[in-house]
Amino acid sequence: MKTRTAIAICLASAAVAGCSSTDDYVDDVNEIQAEVIKASNSVGSDVNASRKEILDQLDTAKSEAEEAVSDLADIDVPEDAEKGHEELIKSFEDLEKLYADVREGIESESGSAAFDELRTKGAEIDKQIDKALDQINDELGLK
């Protein structure tokens, strides 16, 4: 999964805008997504990992995505970013489901088919997350 940095890049722009609630929101989103990115990047990164290690990586990534959904639901969202924020939450919910589905696939069939699903659907979800972050940046005037 590639690193999504759209909001991080705009952090400096938010500081220039001088809106502390926007700054806090951007900081919160950056912090929340950082843990998901870290866990996502670890899934399947070691080609010599055992099946158990891969399943553990999927469990960790799923837990991080689940926690991100919860944390995103709890933060104060600037009114202008509400629509993009909802899309961001939906994307992390999709990611959480993908990790559960891939784990189930690895347990019930060949690992390669499950990893193909992870790559294909993961790339689609990456695009959804990038689109949601771009929308939030647009809504907040940070682009």
Image: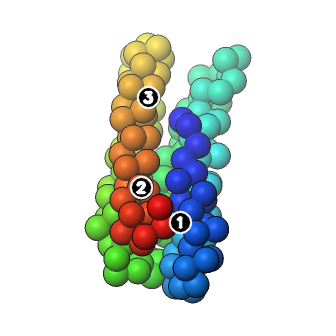
Chain-order first, disc 1 or disc 2: 1
Q: Amino acid at mark 3?
A: Leu
Quarter-wise, where is residue 76 in the image?
bottom left
Q: Identify which residue is drawn at 58% across, 84% down.
A: 18
Task: Determine whether the residue tagged by mark 1 lies in a helix, strand or loop.
Answer: helix
Q: Does 6 appear above or below 32?
A: above
Q: CA distance from mark 3 to mark 2?
A: 23 Å
Residue labelled with disc 1: 29
Q: Give the image location of residue 96, x and y in percent.
A: 42, 47
Pick the residue in front: 101 or 127: 127
Task: Determine whether the residue tagged by mark 3 lies in a helix, strand or loop.
Answer: helix
Cβ atoms under marks 1 and 2 closer than 8 Å: no
Q: Identify which residue is drawn at 48% across, 53% down.
A: 65
Q: CA distance from mark 1 to mark 2?
A: 13 Å
Q: Amino acid at mark 1?
A: Val
Residue labelled with disc 2: 134
Here the colouring is rainbow
Q: Give the image location of residue 24, x and y in percent.
A: 57, 79
Q: CA distance from mark 1 to mark 3?
A: 24 Å
Chain-order first, disc 3 or disc 2: 3
Pick the residue in front: 124 or 63: 124
Q: Identify which residue is drawn at 64% across, 46% down.
A: 38
Quarter-wise, where is residue 133 in the image?
bottom left
Residue 64 visible to an observer of this rendering: no
Q: Amino acid at mark 2?
A: Asp
Q: Identify which residue is drawn at 42% across, 72% down.
A: 140
Q: Does 32 appear above or below 63?
A: below
Residue labelled with disc 3: 118
- Disc 1 vs disc 2: which is toward the camera? 2
- Disc 3 vs disc 2: which is toward the camera? 2
